[in-house]
Amino acid sequence: MSDPGGQQDDGVAGGFRIQPGRLLLEICSLTERLDLAECFPRRQPVELELGSGDGSFLCDLAARHPERNFVGVERLNGRLRKLDRKGQRLGLSNLRGVRIEAAYFLQYLVFPATLAAIHVYFPDPWPKIRHRARRLINEAFTGHAAQALAVGGVLHVRTDSADYFAQMRAVFAASPHFTPVDTPPELASLPTDFEREFNARGLPTLRAAFRRVALILPPDPHNYRASVAGDK
Ligand SMILES: C[S@@+](CC[C@H](N)C(=O)[O-])C[C@H]1O[C@@H](n2cnc3c(N)ncnc32)[C@H](O)[C@@H]1O
């Protein structure tokens, strides 16, 4: 049976199954990495949203960019079903949703250096000091994002929490894998579901973006073979 995007319901070899007639992925193994590009009818750059909520942002972005593929990662079934319904209503073949814990997915299931972008919008702020360790974006996260993004890929964040925003900027500033960049105006003009609520209540929100850069390592004077090979 085909899904609305024309993808066959037989992606088991790629480590996933597509629910018949839907946009939702079922992961077959929690230890094998997924070829996300295989989840779509067309092989094209893949962008991930972690904590995609009702999927309205990702549906808007996917409708504007048929030349890219988008995956929403969300732990709540009800919210994923909304992404599924909206995406189907819009006839999107470049959108998928998956129910799984976001940090695990990024660290263990995404192939290294494969993503064109990661979007993290209004992640749970965990404002109490004793809960801060639960925040998605921390020092470890920058390493996992650097692993998953292709060089040149961009991680986009938004939050309503000034304290969390300071933490996000600090951990990305400390990572040698990222450099800050501007949020493209087109992306900035697309609000998420939570952002619409904050805007309606007149509450300020914050955004930032960080580009994955290649690490340039100085030559290792102790690596005799490499330096001899380089002399030839
Ligand atoms: C505050 S909402 C923001 C939703 C959406 N990004 C927006 O801006 O409208 C956070 C979302 O992340 C999801 N979420 C929180 N922690 C998660 C995790 N560890 N793994 C996957 N999803 C998570 C929640 O279920 C919720 O839908």
Image: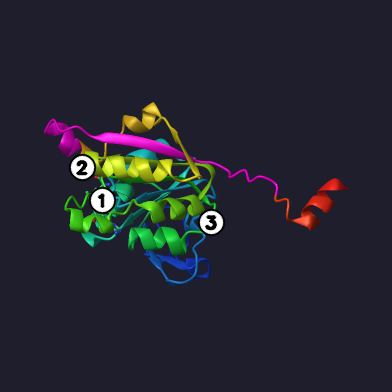
- Alpha carbons under labels 2 and 3: distance apart: 30 Å
Residue 203 falls in which quadrant of the image?
Answer: top left
Indicate which label's residue lies in the foreground, 1 or 3: 3
Q: Which residue matches tag 2?
A: 194
Q: Which residue matches tag 1?
A: 53
Of mark 1 and mark 3, the one earlier in the sequence is 1
Give the residue at x 23% y 34%.
205
Q: Residues within 10 Å of mark 3 (few under 14, many from 20)?
A: some
Give the residue at x 38% y 63%.
104
Q: As displayed, is residue 156 above or below residue 77?
A: above
Helix, strand or loop at label 1? It is: loop
- Alpha carbons under labels 1 and 2: distance apart: 9 Å
Determine whether the beta carbon of the residue marked 3 sits less than 8 angstroms from the nearest atom of ligand 1: no
Question: Is the C-beta separation of discs 1 and 3 under 8 Å?
Answer: no
Q: Is 217 in the magenta? A: yes
Q: Which residue matches tag 3?
A: 112
Residue 152 at x, y percent in the picture: 53, 40
Q: Amino acid at mark 2?
A: Phe
Quarter of the image with the N terminus in it? bottom left
Determine whether the beta carbon of the residue marked 2 sits less than 8 angstroms from the nearest atom of ligand 1: yes
Q: As displayed, is residue 127 above or below residue 3?
A: above
Helix, strand or loop at label 3? It is: loop
